[in-house]
Image: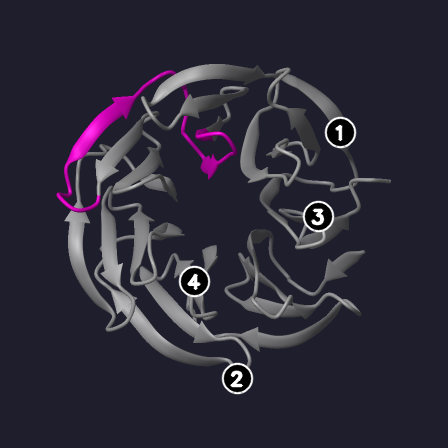
Amino acid sequence: MILTGHTGGVTSLAVLSDGSLASGSHDNTIRIWDLNNGHIKNSLLDHTALIDFLEVLPDGTLASASFDNTIRIWNTTTGVIIRTLTGHSNYVRVLAVFSDDLLTSGSEDQTICIWDVKNGLKIKTLTGHTKSVISLVGLSNDSLASGSFDKTIRIWSVNSGETIRILTGHTEVVYFLVVLNDGLFASSSPDKSIRIWDVSNEQSVKTLIGHESDALAALPNGFLASGEFDGTIRIWDVGKEKTVKTLTGHTSGIMSIVVLPDGSLVSGSHDKTIRIWNLNS
């Protein structure tokens, strides 16, 4: 299935608790899609700049990060804004749920904010990156990983707000972070590498070479999907460090990948479309 309706590139995707799909775009809108028929169920229109990231919160609401420097929390059924979080001084680039009560956000202002989503208050600001923070993922226990245009990954203690470790190896921006099985997480970069890190000791244990990737998604079978700037998607066998399948069809770069409950893959692209892939066919 191919979903069309955005007038700008599709920057972020999120699977909602009712099985619907949310998509954010350069056209400043969020669309809610019925995947049974490919129709738009709702359009969320209140941001005044492009939406760069979407994240589903534990209570089923949707958080959106925008270049208007805000984070908005939405009821996706009614389209009503529940809360607007302000505090970043520049574009909000990425979001990650850390717990039932905490949401983290990374920004062009080089900081990470920790938010209490129950009351909308900013409770902590993490500083240390020297360029924009563009990727985040919660790890085990108290730790959070962040990727930046400064080419590093930082591991943070959310409780103390301090940097635990700085991971180096990428030679370009760290675009995306995702947790894998077996205590591993992955990082992508336009340096044509995807690095696999051990959560327990934050050491690089594998490097997948050859894809100038932006988006990543962990697949149910333990494989990894990566979205390429040329519009292709690669499926990787992480254990064997090799590509097992390449998906073609998009005509521009892939900016987001998510996995549906049935194992299908969904990709959003600069070509303004969303594609749903059956990986078994």
What label sits on residue 64 in the rendered view?
Answer: 4
What amino acid type is highlighted by mark number 3? Gly
What residue lies at 58% left-to-right and 15% top-to-bottom? Answer: 209
Q: Is residue 232 left or right of residue 9?
A: right
- Mark-to-mark CA distance, 4 and 2: 16 Å
What residue lies at 31% left-to-right and 47% top-to-bottom? Answer: 106
Which of the two marks, 3 or 2, is nearer to us in this view? 3
The N terminus sits in image quarter:
bottom right
Query: Is residue 179 rendered magenta in the image?
Result: yes
Q: Is residue 47 left or right of residue 250?
A: left
Label whose residue precedes the other's in the sequence (3 or 1): 1
What label sits on residue 78 in the rendered view?
Answer: 2
Label whose residue precedes the other's in the sequence (4 or 3): 4
What label sits on residue 263 in the rendered view?
Answer: 3
Label whose residue precedes the other's in the sequence (4 or 1): 4
Q: Main secondary structure of the magenta part?
A: loop
Nearest to the observer: residue 66 or residue 266 = 266
Which of the two marks, 3 or 1, is nearer to us in this view? 3
Give the magenta-colored segment's residue range. Answer: 158-185
Judging by the rendered image, the residue that carries numbered circle 1 is 246
Above or below, 35 relative to 268: below
- Mark-to-mark CA distance, 4 and 1: 30 Å
Query: Is residue 226 rendered magenta in the image?
Result: no
Above or below, 269 relative to 27: above
Residue 210 pos. (x, y %): 61, 17
